[in-house]
Image: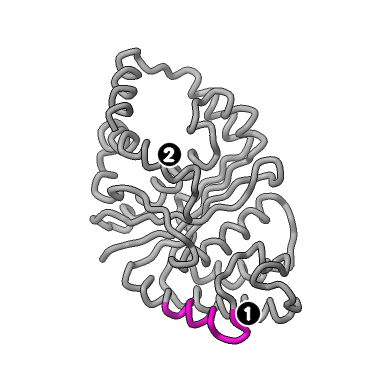
Amino acid sequence: MAVQAFVDDSGTKGTDRVFVLAGFIGPAEQWAVFSGRWKAWLDSPPSIKYLKMNEAVKLKGEFRGWKPAERDKKLAGGVEIIKQFPLRAIHVTIDLEAFEKNWSPHLAKPMNSPYFMGCYTILSGICYDQLDLEVSDPVEVIFDNHVIFAPRINLWYRLIREAWETIYDSALKAVLPSAPRFEDDKQFVPLQASDILAWLFRMAFSGRRNRFEWIAGELSPLIPMSTYASVFSADRMNRIAALSYKQKFSPETVKRWKEKLASR
């Protein structure tokens, strides 16, 4: 059975304490049913064209002019849809201050971005999650569209995928997607559900209490969290950085990677 994962991001450098990529994993055929129900919910009165959690929280955009009680009731309908499906959740959460201080200065573009690091971390986590469930076909991983990073991720993907398959873990070859996809969340509506999840994790790991914690309370008993969810705290990144600085690639390896990247 084909498996799809839908992933959205939340968090901005200079504004938020953490950057989050989060999403749901499920059978492709179930996502088709999910999409139909989600669109029907969007259209049900009072209707909205799409859901963005930030707009719902701040009562702007599609929720401009709504009363909080009306907003909460609408959100509850979307949460009920998520609860009806056999999904798994996953997230990657990165401490932005620690990343900028300890990692970014030592990495070349585009690898010095938390989005780049988070994207590949959650992609591999999704694949390992499915290997543990004995899935033997490539997983389709769909991210919310990103004008800047979508082309950069796809440019590097073949090279990184080859390294994963040949150097890191050959078992990944069975489930890695041919390429990650980047789609419009207004058309691929499961991304709107993932937006809720990413927002909730950003709030939780930023230590910001909010009136929407009930959503996590509704979802967590029914939707298991992948064991490959990752939190890159300041302490963890310091330890990884200390270990990484001891590792050196040979000049031959660096030259071979540059040649392969240039040929893409």
Q: Residue at x 43, y 67 (%)?
A: 87
Q: As displayed, is residue 124 above or below residue 3?
A: above
Q: Residue at x 50, y 19 (%)?
A: 245
Characterize the local packing of mark 2: few (<14), some (14-19) or many (20 or more) Cα atoms within 10 angstroms: some
Q: Locate residue 69, reporting x and y percent.
A: 73, 80
Mark 2 or mark 1: name the one nearer the start of the chain: 1
Q: As displayed, is residue 175 above or below residue 235?
A: below
**Which quadrant of the figure has residue 255?**
top left
Q: Secondary structure at mark 1?
A: helix
Marks 2 and 1 sit apart, C-alpha to C-alpha, by: 37 Å
**Which quadrant of the figure has residue 13?**
top right
User: Magenta span covers which residues?
Assistant: 36-47
Give the number of the disc on residue 235.
none
Does residue 5 belong to the magenta stretch? no
Q: Residue at x 67, y 36 (%)?
A: 97
Q: As displayed, is residue 29 above or below residue 77?
A: above
Q: Would you name the residue on which mark 1 appears? A: 74
| Foreground label between 2 and 1 | 2
Of the residues shown, which amino acid type is indicated by label 2?
A: Arg
Q: Would you name the residue on which mark 2 appears? A: 152
- Looking at this view, name the residue that lies furthest to the top: 251
Q: Locate residue 28, reporting x and y percent.
A: 33, 67
Task: Report the magenta stretch's main SS.
Answer: helix
Q: Locate residue 108, reporting x and y percent.
A: 49, 25
Drawn side of residue 113 relative to residue 170, left or right: right
Q: Residue at x 57, y 47 (%)?
A: 93
The C terminus lies in quadrant? top left
